[in-house]
Amino acid sequence: MTTMMHNTGADTKIARRAMIDSQLRTSGVNEEYVLARMLAVPREDFLPADKASVAYIDRAVMLGANETGGALAAPLFYGKLLIEAAPAPDDRVLVVEGGTGYLAELLRPLVAELTTVSAADAAKGAGAGTFSLIVIDGAIEQLPDALIAQLGDNGRIATGLVLRQVTRLASGRKVAGHLNLQPVEDLGIPVLPAFAAPKRWTFA
């Protein structure tokens, strides 16, 4: 379903309610904390003015002409990502941004402390500290060791993952220094080019 919105606060709240009922609940996203946050945070506030009218469509909204410009992912991705993340009030969270700030705003009231980092900086290992939860706003081909090192023991990660050119929701937990990241389900997710795997030589 595609939901269009106009410019008034009442209209956008109606659009968010339609998103909850027609996109999230019908796809199995029923956790109250997830629905409450997604109802409370206006997606259009995290888009350029010329993209606001498509804030509630059921697919990603690209911020630029291509994927390098960032994207606001489809509502279903955020709903399922929050379920996999299972944020707790004592969590210290690192959010790897997809370009909008929307995911951080969804999570902020649910956790003790939240830090954001751009995808480009996270891929280079930038940032400091140890986190109990890392949440990535997009699909990655590889997870750098430097980012895994910032996850505390028994810490969790929730992200999108590119496997054989298909994007999947994935989550994992770091145990005894090792992270086991497991795919959960196929889902349309914007790809973060900063986390692309090195290209390998192929021979015809």
Image (tube, helix red, strand yellow):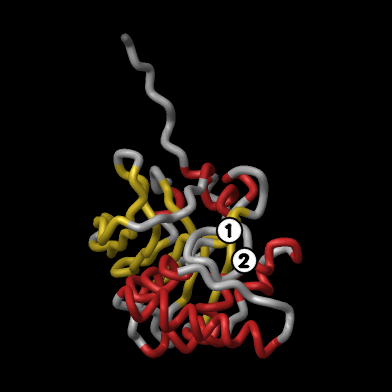
Looking at the rendered structure, the kind of residue marked 2 is Val
In which quadrant of the rendered image does the C terminus lie? top left
Q: Is 138 or 187 nearer to us in this picture?
A: 187
The location of residue 188, given as percent across then percent down, is 40, 55
The residue positioned 47% from the left and 70% from the top of the image is 75
Q: In the displayed structure, does residue 56 sit left or right of residue 63?
A: left
Answer yes or no: is residue 90 visible: no
- Write the residue at 65% across / 85% down: 11
Front residue (pair 66, 23)? 23
Q: Is residue 193 left or right of residue 200?
A: right
Check whether the beta carbons of the residues at disc 1 and disc 2 lie within 8 A of each other: yes
Q: Is residue 149 visible?
A: yes
Q: Which residue is mark 2?
A: 54
For label 2, the crowd category at 10 Å Cα-Cα, with few meaning under 14, some 14 to 19 and many 20 or more, is some
Label 2 element class: helix
Q: Relative to residue 192, is residue 53 drawn left or right?
A: right
> Residue sitting at 75 percent across and 66 percent down?
49
Residue 170, relative to residue 196: is it above or below? below
Mark with earlier residue (1, 2): 2
**Residue hosting label 1:** 61
Q: Quadrant of residue 197?
A: top left
Question: Which residue occupies the foreground of this view, 71 or 128?
Answer: 71
Q: Position of residue 21 (x, y in %)?
A: 42, 83
Please state the horizontal and vertical placement of residue 91, each as a whole percent of the image: 43, 79
Name the residue: 27% across, 56% down. 181
Q: For the residue labelled by badge 1, is the local secondary structure a helix, a strand or a loop?
A: strand
Residue projecting furthest to the top: 204
Q: Amino acid at mark 1?
A: Val
Looking at the image, residue 51 lies above or below residue 91:
above
